[in-house]
Image: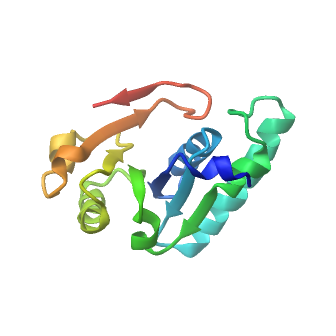
């Protein structure tokens, strides 16, 4: 991996499902370091395997985003089942956990412990208001909703609230 790829900063992806994977690929295509977090280590490994195959497939089909090769993009993506490690030095956190308010609140309480006053906390939610999601966060003023249009990798449209 070239040295110039690491100076953009780090993005944390919380939740390694399909939307979390799409976000990881989008940020890596722009040259950001990406750290993915999930409570299940096998979900992280499955996500990384899927991402690696998908990046290669997109490259072969001529629809890979960005100027980096699939290997360079994949090299920017890591995974961990330690939330603190995922969030360390992140300038942006994209949460993509299931659409269950109780789970989201649990996740935000944990994230809130580790992020700095400069970190943007963003949710991929499609159904909850930012005021409801962030009601227990001390970093509430840093909270936004960034809801992608499906499929996120191919449709460059994000609803920001």
Q: Is residue 47 left or right of residue 69?
A: left
Q: Which residue occupies the foreground of this view, 22 or 6?
A: 6
Residue 158 x, y percent position in the rendering: 43, 28
Residue 35 x, y percent position in the rendering: 53, 60
Residue 55 seen in render: yes
The residue that appears at 46% across and 66% down in the rendered structure is: 86
Q: How many marks?
A: 0
The residue that appears at 65% across and 68% down in the rendered structure is: 45
Q: Quadrant of the C terminus?
A: top left
Quadrant of residue 66 within the rendered picture: top right
The residue that appears at 39% across and 72% down in the rendered structure is: 84
Residue 102 x, y percent position in the rendering: 24, 60
Q: Is residue 153 left or right of residue 54?
A: left
Q: Which color scheme does this rendered protein use? A: rainbow
The vertical placement of 77 against 120, above or below, is below
Q: Is residue 45 left or right of residue 111?
A: right
The vertical placement of 109 against 53, above or below, is below
Q: Which residue occupies the foreground of this view, 9 or 124?
A: 9
Q: Residue furthest right?
A: 60
Residue 97 seen in render: no
Quadrant of residue 125 within the rendered picture: top left
Quadrant of residue 106 within the rendered picture: bottom left
Q: Which residue occupies the foreground of this view, 2 or 99?
A: 2
Q: Quadrant of the N terminus?
A: bottom right
Q: Is residue 90 left or right of residue 102?
A: right
Q: Which residue occupies the foreground of this view, 108 or 93?
A: 93
Residue 42 x, y percent position in the rendering: 60, 72
The residue that appears at 42% across and 51% down in the rendered structure is: 96
């Amino acid at each position: 991996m070239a040295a110039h790829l690491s100076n953009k900063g780090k993005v944390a992806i919380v939740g390694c499902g399909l939307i979390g994977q799409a976000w990881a690929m989008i940020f890596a295509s722009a040259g950001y370091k990406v750290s993915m977090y999930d409570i299940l280590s096998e979900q992280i490994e499955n996500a990384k395997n899927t991402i690696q195959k998908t990046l290669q497939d997109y490259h072969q089909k001529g629809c890979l985003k960005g100027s980096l090769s699939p290997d360079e993009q994949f090299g920017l993506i890591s995974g961990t089942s330690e939330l603190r490690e995922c969030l360390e030095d992140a300038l942006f956190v994209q949460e993509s956990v299931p659409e269950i308010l109780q789970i989201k609140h649990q996740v935000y309480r944990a994230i809130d412990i580790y992020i700095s006053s400069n970190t943007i906390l963003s949710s991929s939610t499609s159904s909850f208001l930012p005021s409801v999601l962030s009601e227990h966060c001390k970093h509430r003023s840093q909270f936004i909703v960034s809801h992608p249009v499906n499929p996120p990798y191919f449709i460059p449209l994000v609803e920001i609230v």
